[in-house]
Image (tube, grey):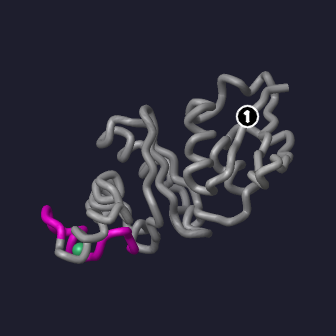
Amino acid sequence: MEAPICNRCLASRVLCSSCSEKLRKGEISEIDIQVSREMFFLRKRIKDINHLKICKVLENKNSIVVLLGDGDLDKLTGKVLAVVRTLSRRLNKRVRLVENTSNVKKLVEEFISPVKLLGLTVKFLPNNQEVYKIIISKEDMNKLPIKKEEIENFLKKITKKEFHIEFY
Ligand SMILES: [Zn+2]
């Protein structure tokens, strides 16, 4: 298992000087540490976690997103739900496991899954900022795994681009 903190810090309650420094500089956050340690503990029960890479953990008011390495969800075959449920219970928030990818469409699809993406368009503002419009069926409005605003916010944090979900 690879995580934002080193192996020694995964197993310990205190941070080594190198990981403390990363936290101080803002390269990692408390939620990175908390979730990484939970996953490290959980890997005793769910062995496939050993093969995962935790790239980053993001947090909003009601939900947490664990960004895993590209292709990592396949390594968790059949255990994704067990991991999500355990983490959600332990952290008291909705948890999503998402693969880190530079493919914006794939990232959006992972965030809204099981809801289907009807369309994704990009618009350039005069300042060259990219704004993505995510189109979803009106019928799926209440089926999103986490709140619309939180999805938009997570996507912005990951890609540094603007996202708007619209229902048709
Ligand atoms: Zn460390």
Q: Which residue is mark 1?
A: 165
Q: Does the magenta run of residues contain 3?
A: yes
The image shows residue 136 at horizontal and vertical percentages of 79, 33
- Please tell me whether mark 1 sits on a helix, a strand or a loop: strand
Left or right: 79, with 45 as reference point: right
For image coordinates 71% across by 24% down, the residue present is: 141
For the record, the magenta segment spans 1-15
Left or right: 139, with 17 as reference point: right
For image coordinates 59% across by 63% down, the residue present is: 100
The image shows residue 27 at horizontal and vertical percentages of 38, 65
Say which quadrant the N terminus sits in.
Answer: bottom left
Q: Is residue 43 visible?
A: no
Q: Is residue 157 visible?
A: yes
The image shows residue 155 at horizontal and vertical percentages of 62, 48
Q: Main structural element of the magenta stretch: helix, strand or loop?
A: loop
Tally of marks: 1
Q: Does the magenta run of residues contain 143?
A: no
Left or right: 147, with 1 as reference point: right
Q: Dividing the picture into quarters, in which one does residue 93 lie?
A: top left
The image shows residue 156 at horizontal and vertical percentages of 61, 48
* Looking at the image, residue 72 lies above or below residue 110: below
Q: Amino acid at mark 1?
A: Ile
Instruction: Specify few, some or many for label 1: CA neighbours under 10 Å numbering under 14, 14-19, or 20 or more.
Output: some
